[in-house]
Image: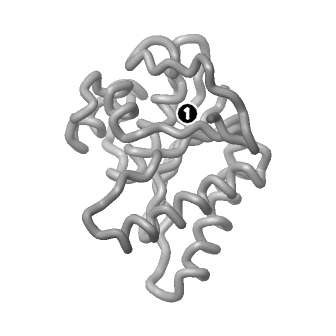
Amino acid sequence: MRILGIDPGLRITGFGVIDKSGSDLIYVGSGCIKTSEGELPARLKSILDSLSEVIAQYRPECAAVEQVFVNINPKSTLLLGQARGVAICAAVMNNLMVAEYTALQIKQAVVGNGHAKKDQVQEMVMRLLNLTSSPSADAADALACAICHAHAGVGLGKIPLAGYRMKRGRLV
């Protein structure tokens, strides 16, 4: 199964693609989509177009997206939510099933500690995918999201998905 992990952001959206073969996780690719300063609609379109290109290039079977947490600044939270919505739309428009995970679930699945720091997540992503160098923080978060989905319900984190169902292309 090929999984696309997405770490949404308005300035930088990370993406990571892995293959799951049995219990093996294989790194396929990762990177960041950076938007330039400017009007919000143009930035959102840039994320949508770029993620659609990533999906066309790597042909994942499903996508995993990190859920938004509430920041102290409500405006930042709303902007992040819009970037996240565009990421989900890109996946759904390309007929991908979308699963959503909290940062706590992702860290638990990858590091074994839901309160792990970013550098710990990067280190474990490197180890789990046998990478020789560390991906950027945003790409590592996206790869961690994909790893979390690969292990959903079993193995690391034991994140139960039983009882969830599909609604408009999303696990609910």
Question: Is residue 98 placed above or below 149 in the rendered structure?
Answer: below
Residue 108, compared with residue 103, is above or below; it is: above
The residue at 35%/69% (across/down) is: 74
Q: Is residue 83 above or below residue 143?
A: below
Q: Is residue 128 left or right of residue 66?
A: left
Q: Position of residue 91 (x, y in %)?
A: 69, 50
The residue positioned 38% from the left and 44% from the top of the image is 140
Quick one: quadrant of the N terminus? top right
Residue under numbered circle 1: 18
Task: Name the foreground residue: 158 vs 46.
Answer: 158
Q: Position of residue 24 (x, y in %)?
A: 52, 16
Other-residue count near label 1 (Cα within 10 Å), few / some / many at <14 / 14–19 / ≥20: many
Q: What residue do we see at 64% from left, 40% from top?
A: 98
Q: Name the residue type under label 1.
A: Ile
* Depth order, front residue of 163/122: 163
Task: Report if residue 118 is visible in the image.
Answer: yes
Residue 160's spot in the image, x, y percent? 50, 18
Q: Secondary structure at mark 1?
A: strand
Please indicate whether residue 53 sits to the left or right of residue 94 in the image.
left
The residue at 63%/53% (across/down) is: 88
